[in-house]
Amino acid sequence: MSATNSSRLKLRLESDDELVDQFATNWHILDKFAGGLLVAPGTTPPDSELYDGCLVREGANGKSWLAVRNPLSGTYSKSWLTYPWQCAAYANVLVGSSQPDGFVVYGLSTVDPLRCTNADSSALVGGQLIPPIPGIYQAQLHTRWSYADGADGIYKSGAISLNGNVGVRAWNCDIRRKNNNVVTNFCAQIFTFSPSEAPYPVGVLLAQNSGGNRDVDIDLTLTLLSPK
């Protein structure tokens, strides 16, 4: 006589010649369709409580993931299914005059908790926002310059920086709205942070060529659209 265990939930499967439970032949069905685990936010169950494909939901924060077993090590990694995440931060900075394409990274200083989801000030590192996991993100930048400088050829530009890069012209958004002594920019970009990359900062690029220093309010919102 012998008995084996089911592959997922480790249910004891009795052999045909030692059936003692009238439901024994149904264990494989329970094993196949059993639901996932509910854990406290931020909790990772020990490997002994997981199986390949186990669904884990982290309580009230809306995060959920599948446990994926490494066949070589026998350990499990997370494959995120849902990860509600957004972080917004702002600052007031003084921008020196440069060429229209003379972009410089300017740091954010304060996280706005009212516009954050599953994020706090720990996401703001070195004046830039750090994506928490690989995924598809949308970044939105708003700027508000205190001087209109309405003469032709005067630029006040805002752009989005990935990994401190100031040379990618595709991020430049010189969309200006004038309201008396105020100029505003708006820039939105969608980008992908892949699993093979290290987390990189998302920041603010600014440039203006008025000939003097200019005061500007900046506001950056980073939203995770989908885990990858």
Image (tube, helix red, strand yellow):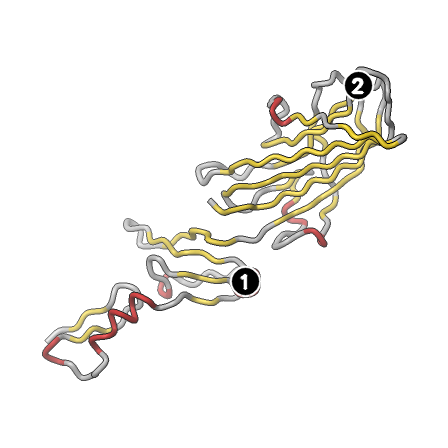
Q: Which mark is residue 170?
A: none
Q: Residues within 10 Å of mark 1 (few under 14, many from 20)?
A: some
Q: Is residue 172 above or below residue 38?
A: above
Helix, strand or loop under label 2: loop
Residue 103 x/y as whole percent: 70, 23
Residue 29 x/y as whole percent: 27, 70
Q: Is residue 117 above or below residue 228?
A: below
- Residue 119 is left or right of residue 50, and the answer is right
Dot in front, 2 or 1: 2
Residue 200 x/y as whole percent: 56, 36
Residue located 48% across and 58% down the image: 64
Residue located 73% across and 49% down the image: 112
Sequence order check, earlier mark of 2 and 1: 1
Q: Which mark is residue 41?
A: 1
Amino acid found under the numbered disc labelled 2? Asn
- Would you name the residue on which mark 2 appears? 209
The N terminus is located in which quarter?
Answer: bottom left
Residue found farthest to the right? 180
Residue 161 x/y as whole percent: 63, 31
Q: Nearer the viewer, residue 43 or 152?
A: 152
Query: CA separation, marks 2 and 1?
Result: 48 Å
Residue located 69% across and 38% down the image: 127
Query: Residue 214 is drawn in which quadrant?
Result: top right
